[in-house]
Amino acid sequence: MGAISEKDKKHLQKIFEKNVQTGVKILVFTQEDRHREIKELMQELATTSNKIEVELYDFTRDSEKIKQYNIDKIPAIAIIGKEDYGVRFYGIPSGYEFSSLVEDIIDVSRGTTDLPEKIRNQLGSINKPIHIQVFVTPTCPYCPKVVRLAHKFAIENDLIISDMIEATEFPNLALKYRVMSVPKTVINEKIEFVGALSEEDFLEYILAA
Amino acid sequence: MNTDILIIGSGPAGIQAAIYAARRKVDVIILGKLENSSLAKAHVENYFGISGPIVGIDLLRVGKEQAEKFGAKFIEEDALHLERKDDKFIVKTEGGKEVESKAVIFAMGVSRKKLGVKGEQQFQGRGVSYCAECDCGFFKGKKVAVIGDGSAAASSAILLAKYASKVYLISKKLSTSEHLQDELKVGNIEIIEGKRISEIYGNSAVGGIKLDGSSLEVEGVFIELGSKGVIELAVNVGLLPDPRGYIHVNEEQKTSVLGIFACGDICGPPLQLAKAVGEGCIAGIEAAEYVKRISKLEKQTV
């Protein structure tokens, strides 16, 4: 153990205590003897709040859960609140992305986000499935902004599923989507953009997908 | 090195903040190069009390003397890295110095990030990158070019040399610290000075660049002009600029992170000298008050 320092744990305890409302489940999908790092990180994170629970699933054995949560690659994390909002992480949310994970847990526990009402209304009008994939690297300071927006959109609309994908952990996907710069966002396999955008501009792309 | 207040950026906002803070008897260190301020080359004629146009660099030089007279210390180097350590902030400079400070004032302005050459926009995300830290991993074993004259270009070339097979550092005239220049002496870094890049070419992704008419084959082009930008320095301490790259402050020029203040162009438009100076004044006063308050608390607890 020791994935999170004692000082950071204290800090996390404080912010979770203050901000986490209802219970949150972190579902971790891995393969038995692999991905120790992500399992340890999530289990340690869960020790900082009695409202956060971790469930470990095996990619080969727990096929029902894999199907239920639409997991197609590992390691994967699904953050579940009162319902499954479609918030996913593929690869370890380390480096700058750890903050995305922490903020997502808080939003999922509340089932709502701080997006402006105008944006939320527009999101509400989306009536077809939207799949957002955000490619990141742990050393990218611009990436959490995009990941967070994609996840907030997912929380606000049941039809939106948003994945953070750590590009260096999934080189084949990075190749497939020609990722050479991060953050790179792909919406419904047909629209893509590089870089951080404002809420309005990101939403425009979703509406166009 | 220890100080009470560290100011990043030596333009009008930073220097004005230094003047006000130093007069309040706190230790002030200010980082940056006068000639890199966007004011340096400007002809000023809309600033209070100035009748004819005056060249910005002259104003900056007088401002520096003023600040020094009141006790502020200038280090003419760029900040490369900022982090929090307990209740203090640590800044690493391009010269390899470490400065520990109780408060930090962001006054580094906004810098031009784009090169403005043919192909740059077309290949963005397909080989053209503005963030070596973010994208270095995608260029393992490949040839890349880094474009820029300052500390950002030099430090990016050093990072990329760990991944790429070859790094061409292309600069009109490289101007960075000896410390970084020593680190650039790596086998796979080649410095090309005095040549102009006129085009980034390729098919579906970057294939190379044109330098004064001759071609150089590369798969990645990293555009790293000037010094490290606000995002690279800010995120490590939990400060996230808005999508336009500006930092939000309250009326006391305080950011969302305790102990960090911001002033000048970095806080958003209007990008004007008068506004920068006004905000610098407030940031200097408020940062000094903050430092005095926490120093008093420290004494009480001891």
Image (cartoon, grey):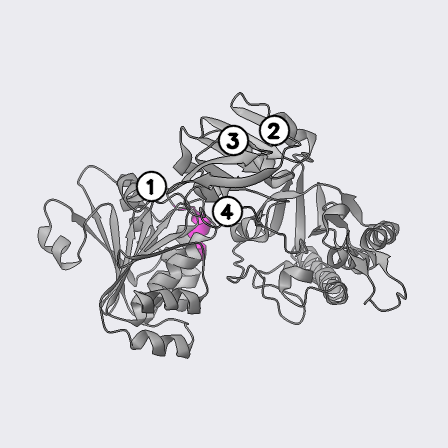
**Where in the figure is residue B167, as x and y percent of width and height?**
51, 29
Asked if the residue at tag 2 contacts the one at tag 3, i.e. Cβ–Cβ closer than 8 Å, the answer is no
Classify B184 as above or below A173: above
Distance from disc 3 to disc 1, alpha carbons, whole Å, reads 52 Å
Q: Earlier in the sequence, mark 3 or mark 4?
A: 4
The residue wearing badge 2 is B192
Q: 10 Å neighbourhood of mark 3: few (<14), some, or many (≥20)?
A: some
Instruction: Identify the residue shown where x is 13% and y is 59%.
Output: A68
Q: 10 Å neighbourhood of mark 1: few (<14), some, or many (≥20)?
A: few
Closer mark to the observer between disc 1 and disc 2: 2
Is residue B171 toward the left or the right of residue B73 in the image? left
Asked if the residue at tag 2 contacts the one at tag 4, i.e. Cβ–Cβ closer than 8 Å, the answer is no
Q: Amino acid at mark 3?
A: Ser
Residue B120 bears which disc, if any? Answer: 4
The residue wearing badge 3 is B215
Q: In terms of depth relative to the viewer, which is nearer, B144 or A87? A: B144
**Where in the figure is residue B50, as x and y percent of width and height?**
88, 65
Q: In terms of depth relative to the viewer, which is nearer, A67 or B211? A: B211
- Tell me if I can see residue B262 in this picture: no
